[in-house]
Image (cartoon, helix red, strand yellow):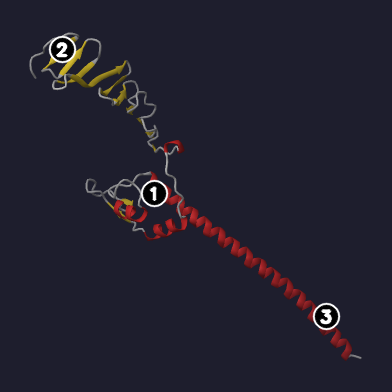
Amino acid sequence: IAPARIGAGLAADLGGRLRVRGSTAGVWLYDQTLAADRGFVGMGDGNHVGFYGHVGAGWGFLMSVSNGYIGIGKFEPAHPIDVASGAYLSAGGVWTSVSDVHRKRDFQPVDAQEILEKVAALPITTWSYLAEPGVRHIGPTAQDFHAAFGVGPDEKAIAQIDPDGVALAAIQALAQESGRQRAEDRGRQERITRLEIENAELKAKTEELEARLRALEAR
């Protein structure tokens, strides 16, 4: 680092790249070629410290010094990890994905029965990550999941929300099958009940005819 050079409005200028101004608690990252500040690392206010992109990004990463909450693209994090998109990690350790209808588009219906059939054919194995030998997990590979359902940006990862949607669609298909089965069972039971009634009526008529026949024979 070159010796500090003090310029107009600067408290320190280290090598012409790192600049400290008296009005801010942090370091400005200066681009000599563009002759402009490109970013800032320091205090956002009295309660937040982070990284600021001076070319439109704004506060890309911020931490509250009072509770340690981290904001990604969000200045006032309300959760341990709070993302500008609306997703967050709760204090209980639960990752909550964005599912607001107003943040979605291009809705298309799904064939729940087809989803169920694909789930039934989906290879499910137990495995370990290369970086975590000995720690077992269960589930499909991203390649198999992407080949079956064609969702997500690529075949290298599975977005958490997609298996949830697949599972719900498959459950709906099972519920539909169960409903049809119950309807068929009710229909069979109704037919059996009618046959039992008809059989009882036929038996009563037969017994009545036999009684009349015996009466005639006794004359």
Q: Is residue 15 above or below residue 170?
A: above
Q: Is residue 215 above or below residue 95?
A: below
Mark nearer the N terminus (3 vs 1): 1
Amino acid at the residue labelled 3 = Glu
Rendered residue at 73%/71% (across/down): 197
Give coordinates of residue 85: x percent, y percent: 37, 33
Mark nearer the N terminus (1 vs 2): 2
Q: CA distance from mark 3 to mark 1?
A: 66 Å
| Mark 2 lies on residue | 12
**Closer to the camera: disc 2 or disc 3?**
2
Give coordinates of residue 29: x percent, y percent: 19, 21
Rendered residue at 63%/65% (across/down): 187
Amino acid at the residue labelled 2 = Ala
Element type at mark 3 = helix
| Mark 1 lies on residue | 163
Rendered residue at 76%/77% (across/down): 202
Which mark identifies residue 208? Answer: 3
Give the farthest residue toward the right.
219
- Quadrant of residue 126 in the image? bottom left
Is residue 160 left or right of 4 when viewed as pictured?
A: right
Amino acid at the residue labelled 1 = Pro
Q: Contact, CB < 8 Å: mark 2 with mark 3?
A: no
Element type at mark 2 = strand
Rendered residue at 18%/10% (across/down): 10
Q: CA distance from mark 1 to mark 2?
A: 53 Å
Quadrant that contains the N terminus: top left
Give the farthest residue toward the top.
8
Give coordinates of residue 184: x percent, y percent: 59, 64
Q: Contact, CB < 8 Å: mark 1 with mark 2?
A: no
Quadrant that contains the C terminus: bottom right
Mark nearer the N terminus (2 vs 3): 2
Is residue 34 left or right of 50 when viewed as pictured?
A: left
